[in-house]
Image (cartoon, rainbow, N blue to C red):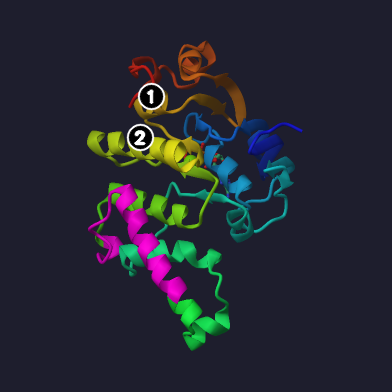
């Protein structure tokens, strides 16, 4: 058995006549900062949906820390240590920013339901701890002063950061980010790159991210897998992938050729 954190073998997904993912093999090593890229409709989000148990595969296996994830519900996959954000932001608009993070702790509550109802001391202590930890996570992602704001009042880029904070609240070992930089301005994107690197370097969280912003991807990720029409067309270090003719053709030259490399620092 390999030492990969996440191992995907022959993973396929069919929607009617469409083979959205065709026998994908992918390994994410512990401590990886990996990217999954490809044109629209390539099957990237579908891959995340299969890993996290939102969509059932038509074939293949996914193992996390050696454990098969087949048939597990999303909440169970999350409790095992896989957290994600969504391409289409999914926040509770009517809750505050902090409350949205607290939702992420829900699956980790140690005090049981009864003590929660009765407001026993153990629950109150846990409540306090979660509250403090929630504020720490908001600080970490750069939303420290916005805890009491309604989530719907946040700018688009801030909502993406809040999704990351909520994902972190679930205590992941692997974080799956679906287009985290979408809608962000260049300053926000640069801050996001620093954040993602800190999550890996300081918190030991492995990251697999989907992103169309090639400048961001090329400077942040250490390895890339490129999908097109559900199939892997290239994989390797960003510099190798960037000059791969199959990749350039898949993107019709858009973006990739012009994305400047900055020696791995975004
Ligand atoms: N639930 C579904 N039912 C039917 N078809 C789907 C479903 N989910 C995805 N698809 C189709 O599968 C293909 C892959 O979609 P997917 O969302 O994985 O692409 P993507 O690589 O994430 O693209 P984008 O960059 O636009 O987000 C697309 O053709 C899409 O229309
Ligand atoms: Mg997608």
Q: Are marks 2 and 1 in contact (CB under 8 Å)?
A: yes
Provide residue 174's location: percent of width, then percent of height. 54, 44
Secondary structure state at the residue bearing disc 2: helix
First of labels 2, 1 by sequence position: 2
Q: Is residue 128 magenta?
A: yes
Secondary structure state at the residue bearing disc 1: helix
User: Is residue 6 left or right of 38 when viewed as pictured?
Assistant: right
Task: Name the foreground residue: 19 vs 82.
Answer: 82
| Circle on res. 75 | none
Provide residue 227's location: percent of width, then percent of height. 56, 28
Q: Residue at x 41, y 32 (%)?
A: 212
Mark 1, residue position = 219
Provide residue 104's location: percent of width, then percent of height. 46, 61
Q: Residue at x 44, y 18 (%)?
A: 252
Q: Can residue 89 be spotted in the picture?
A: no
Q: Which residues are magenta?
A: 125-152
Predominant SS along the magenta part:
helix
Q: Residue furthest bottom?
A: 118
Q: Residues within 10 Å of mark 1 (few under 14, many from 20)?
A: some
Q: Residue at x 34, y 19 (%)?
A: 259
Mark 2, residue position = 193
């Amino acid at each position: 058995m390999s030492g990969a954190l996440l191992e995907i073998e022959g993973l396929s997904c069919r929607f009617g006549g469409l083979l959205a993912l065709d026998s994908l093999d992918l390994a994410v090593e512990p401590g990886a900062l990996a990217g999954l890229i490809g044109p629209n409709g390539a099957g990237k989000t579908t891959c995340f949906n299969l890993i996290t148990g939102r969509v059932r595969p038509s074939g293949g296996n996914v193992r996390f820390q050696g454990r098969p994830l087949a048939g597990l519900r999303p909440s169970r996959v999350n409790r095992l240590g896989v957290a994600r954000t969504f391409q289409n932001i999914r926040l509770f608009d009517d809750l505050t920013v902090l409350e949205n993070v607290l939702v992420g702790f829900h699956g980790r509550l140690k005090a049981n339901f009864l003590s929660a109802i009765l407001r026993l001391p153990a629950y109150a202590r846990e409540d306090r701890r979660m509250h403090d930890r929630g504020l720490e996570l908001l600080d970490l992602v750069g939303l420290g002063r916005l805890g009491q704001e309604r989530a719907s009042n946040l700018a688009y880029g801030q909502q993406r950061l809040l999704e990351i904070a909520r994902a972190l609240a679930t205590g992941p070992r692997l974080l799956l980010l679906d287009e985290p930089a979408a809608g962000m301005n260049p300053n926000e994107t640069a801050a996001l790159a620093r954040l993602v690197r800190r999550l890996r370097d300081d918190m030991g969280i492995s990251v697999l991210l989907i992103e169309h912003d090639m400048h961001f991807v090329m400077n942040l990720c250490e390895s890339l897998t490129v999908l097109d029409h559900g199939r892997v067309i290239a994989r390797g270090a960003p510099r190798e992938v960037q000059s791969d003719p199959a990749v350039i053709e898949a993107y019709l030259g858009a973006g990739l050729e012009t994305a400047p490399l900055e020696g791995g620092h975004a």
